[in-house]
Amino acid sequence: MTAGRYTYLGPEGTFTEAALRTLPEAATRELVPMVSVPAAMDAVRNGEAGGALVPIENSVEGGVTATVDELASGEPLLIYREVLLPIAFALLVRPGTELEAIKTVTGHPVAQPQVRRWLERNLPEAQWESAASNADGARLVQEGRYDAAFAGEFAAATYGLEPLVTDIHDAQHAVTRFVLVGRPSRPASPTGADKTSVALWLRSDRPGALLEILQEFAACGVNLMRIESRPTGEGIGRYCFQIDCEGHLADRRVGEALMGLHRLCSEVRFLGSYPRADGVRPALEPGTTDGDFVAAAQWVHRSLDGQPDGARPPR
Ligand SMILES: O=C(O)C(=O)Cc1ccccc1
């Protein structure tokens, strides 16, 4: 039963797997590790899996480009959930390896900026090589390709390694955000603490084009949580923007802002409205509640019907 299957960035022992296992429904699903983010997402596109968990951004390094680009291209997928996971790395080695013997280290490219200072201080001569994921780095150490890998301490047992150093993180409170994507269908109902993601392409390259987009959010009182630009591959200066904002598409202020984007952009791809992992409810600006938008629309209709509001003194 493929709908019950969830893929994730593998192999076994990634932070992504740890994040996936925090979801209650993971206990009843078949969890299938994939070799890359695109492979995990394509399995959903072609119906082999009902969902995929992939890393999307990190509080130190920013966007995970493979995920950001996959969401903007190919068959559309929607985000249904997000998971936040605090990240601390362990330096995993084959049993008996000592720190002085380490000449090569590996890990996911997003891991490197999170351990850079630790490496400079403790292994200044070691050569870094990127792996497809942190657990894949651990697998490569097991195979003898590298001397050490930065990964979750929990990955050690899976690959017959031992944690030589634990709790490595240059920045305190480093957090990675993961998203559960599925084929497009109705977004989950609003919870009051939601987030909405879109990808957009500007209609033309002219002064103020991006400002016009941002003004739509500002005018509707919608707070932005992430904005990222990615090259489209169509030439220097051609960008796709991805934006996360507070609120659900069903919230009037969000719907109005996105309608503005639809008018202004050559393309807007809705990437989902889903509950915020931190459960934080937005602080609304005066005049931006659902009731305010409904009252404004009713006022327009009353005016068109020849029933203006009660006599107000002219200003
Ligand atoms: O899930 C993993 O282990 C990954 O390789 C992706 C990643 C990279 C850095 C921090 C968290 C997740």
Image: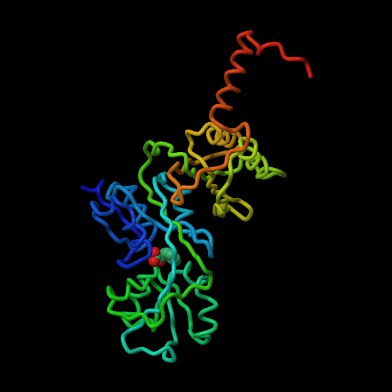
Q: Which color scheme does this rendered protein use?
A: rainbow
Q: Looking at the image, in which quadrant does ligand 1 appear?
A: bottom left
Image coordinates for residue 275, horizontal then vertical, percent? 43, 45
Q: Quadrant of residue 34?
A: bottom left
Residue in the picture at 46% in, 44% down: 271
In this picture, residue 19 sits left or right of residue 212? left
Say how many tags the image has. Answer: 0
Q: In the picture, which quadrant includes the C terminus?
A: top right
In this picture, residue 45 sits left or right of residue 58? left
Q: Nearer the viewer, residue 216 or 189?
A: 189
Q: Residue furthest top?
A: 306
In this picture, residue 197 sits left or right of residue 97? right
Q: Quadrant of residue 222?
A: top right
Image coordinates for residue 256, horizontal then vertical, percent? 56, 32
Residue in the picture at 37% in, 38% down: 185
Residue in the picture at 43% in, 80% down: 105
Residue in the picture at 31% in, 58% down: 21
Image coordinates for residue 31, horizontal then vertical, percent? 27, 57
Image coordinates for residue 163, horizontal then vertical, percent? 36, 80
The answer to whether 311 is drawn above or below residue 231 in the figure is above
Q: Residue furthest left?
A: 1
The answer to whether 47 is drawn above or below residue 13 in the figure is above
Q: Nearer the viewer, residue 59 or 138?
A: 59
Q: Quadrant of residue 216?
A: top right
